C-alpha cells in the first residue's frame, strides 16, 4: 500500500471507520464563580461539576456526537475516578477496550475555576500516572480505522506510535494536537498529515502572527496541512504548496464557558476533513462549532440533535 500525502483526498477515498484517539483522560472538578477571585480571596462557588475531561476524549465525544465511530486509548488509575471516566466514555458511544489500567495508579485530576462573568477558565492539573507507552499502543488494533488523532504529549513514545501507524496502516490519516511546547515535541512533526496547533503553542515559539507560525511549521515538518486556532481572531491554515488562509471567529452572545473550546475545534476540523470538505470549509465549520460551544456549558451540546452550522 502507498502512503496518501493529501489528507483531504485520503478521507475521500476511504470507507467509513472509527476515529482512534490517543491521549489522557481526566476527572475535572469545575467550580463556577461569579468573577475570578484575587489572590488570597475566599469566594463561594455558584455551582460544582464533576465531569470527564481530557483533550482527546473531549474531541472524541464531539466526533461521536457528529456520527463517527470512536475509540480511545490511554492510561487510567484503578480508582473510582477511572470508573466514572470509563462509564462516561461508554455513554458517549466511545469504545474503551484498549484503555490501560495502572494498578495502584491515581487518575489525573484538574481543578478548574470557571468565571461566569466572561466564561474564562483557569486550570490546575494534577498528574501522577505513567503515560501510555509505545509498547502499550503496539497491542492496539489498527484495522479498519478512518483516522488516528494523537495528543502531542510524551513525544518520544508518541513518535514511535506515529511511526507504527505509518508503517502498518499507511493510508490512515494522522493528526497531532500541538497544545504546549514540551521537550522533544519536534519528534512529532514527522509522520502526521495534519498538525493542529494552539495559539499558546505558537506564542511559546516566539510567533505573534498565525501566518508566520504556519509557514515555519510546514518548513519544520512533513505535514500536508497546518492549522492554528487563534482565539477571538478565529483560526488560520496552510496547505503545503498553498498560501495562508484565515477564518474569522464565531462569537456567541454571551460567552458562557470556554473550557474545551480547542478540543471542540479540533474535532470540527477532523469531522470536516472526514466529510471530504476542502480545508477552508472544514475550518469554517470547526470555528463555528467551537463558538457555539463557548455559548454553552460543557463540551457536548445536548442529546437532542447534532450541532448545526447554518
Image: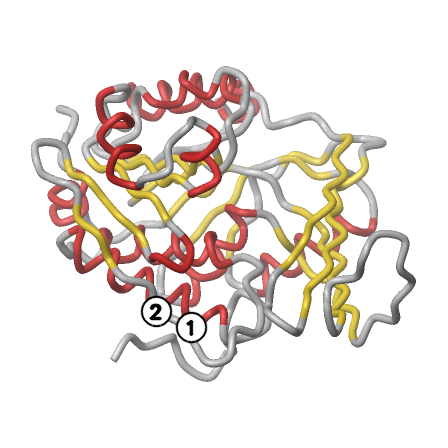
Q: Is residue 247 above or below residue 212?
A: below
Would residue 165 appear left or right of 82 to someone viewing this image? left
**Closer to us: 270 or 198:** 198
Looking at the rendering, which quadrant does residue 63 occupy?
A: bottom left
Q: Residues within 10 Å of mark 2 (few under 14, many from 20)?
A: many
Kindly identify the residue that appears in the image at 84 percent across and 52 percent down.
39
Mark 2 or mark 1: whose residue is earlier in sequence: 2
Q: Which residue is labeled 2 in the image?
A: 250
Which mark identifies residue 272? none
- Nearer-the-camera pick, 266 or 90: 266
Q: Where residue 215 sits: x, y (%)?
A: 22, 30
Residue 78 is left or right of residue 198, and the answer is: right
Which quarter of the rendered picture does the N terminus lie within? Answer: top left
Circle 1 packing at 10 Å, graded few (<14), some (14-19), many (20+), is many
Callout 1 secondary element: helix
Say how many tags the image has.
Answer: 2
Horizontal side of residue 156 vs 11, given as left or right: right
Residue closer to the observer: 263 or 14: 263
Does dot 2 land on a helix, a strand or a loop? loop
Q: Residue at x 12, y 46 (%)?
A: 13
Q: Report the residue marked by disc 1.
A: 292
Q: Nearer the viewer, mark 2 or mark 1?
A: 2
Q: Where does the image place residue 298, in percent across and percent down from the top left? A: 58, 68
Question: How far apart, in angstroms, are the residues tagged by discs 2 and 1?
Answer: 8 Å
Residue drawn at x 42%, y 38% is 177
- Vertical side of 233 occupied by 82: above or below: above
Q: Are marks 2 and 1 in contact (CB under 8 Å)?
A: yes
Where is residue 87, by image quadrant?
bottom right
Q: Is residue 225 placed above or below 122 in the rendered structure? A: above
Furthest-bottom residue in this view: 304
Colouring chosen for the image of the structure: secondary structure
Amino acid at each position: 500500500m502507498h502512503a496518501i500525502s493529501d489528507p483531504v483526498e485520503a478521507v475521500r477515498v476511504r470507507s467509513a471507520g472509527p476515529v482512534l484517539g490517543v491521549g489522557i483522560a481526566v476527572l475535572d472538578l469545575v467550580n463556577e464563580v461569579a468573577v475570578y477571585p484575587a489572590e488570597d480571596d475566599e469566594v463561594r462557588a455558584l455551582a460544582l461539576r464533576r465531569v470527564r475531561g481530557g483533550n482527546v476524549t473531549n474531541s472524541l465525544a464531539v466526533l461521536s456526537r457528529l456520527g463517527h465511530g470512536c475509540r480511545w486509548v490511554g492510561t487510567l488509575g484503578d480508582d473510582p475516578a477511572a470508573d466514572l471516566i470509563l462509564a462516561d466514555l461508554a455513554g458517549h458511544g466511545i469504545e474503551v477496550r484498549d484503555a490501560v489500567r495502572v494498578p495502584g495508579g491515581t487518575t489525573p485530576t484538574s481543578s478548574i475555576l470557571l468565571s461566569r462573568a466572561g466564561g474564562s477558565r483557569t486550570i490546575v492539573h494534577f498528574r501522577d500516572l505513567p503515560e501510555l507507552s509505545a509498547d502499550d499502543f503496539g497491542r492496539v488494533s489498527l484495522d479498519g480505522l478512518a483516522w488516528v488523532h494523537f495528543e502531542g504529549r510524551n513525544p518520544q513514545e508518541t513518535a514511535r506510535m506515529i511511526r507504527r501507524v505509518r508503517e502498518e496502516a499507511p493510508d490512515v490519516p494522522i493528526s497531532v494536537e500541538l497544545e504546549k511546547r514540551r521537550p522533544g515535541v519536534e519528534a512529532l512533526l514527522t509522520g502526521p498529515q495534519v498538525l493542529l496547533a494552539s495559539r499558546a503553542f505558537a506564542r511559546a515559539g516566539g510567533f505573534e502572527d498565525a501566518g508566520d507560525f504556519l509557514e515555519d511549521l510546514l518548513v519544520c515538518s512533513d505535514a500536508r496541512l497546518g492549522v492554528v486556532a487563534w482565539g477571538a481572531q478565529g483560526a488560520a491554515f496552510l496547505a503545503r504548496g498553498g498560501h495562508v488562509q484565515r477564518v474569522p471567529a464565531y462569537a456567541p452572545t454571551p460567552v458562557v464557558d470556554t473550557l474545551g473550546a480547542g478540543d471542540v475545534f479540533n474535532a470540527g476540523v477532523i469531522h470536516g476533513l472526514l466529510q471530504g470538505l476542502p480545508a477552508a470549509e472544514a475550518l469554517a465549520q470547526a470555528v463555528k462549532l467551537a463558538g457555539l460551544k463557548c455559548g454553552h456549558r460543557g463540551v457536548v451540546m445536548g442529546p437532542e440533535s447534532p450541532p448545526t452550522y447554518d
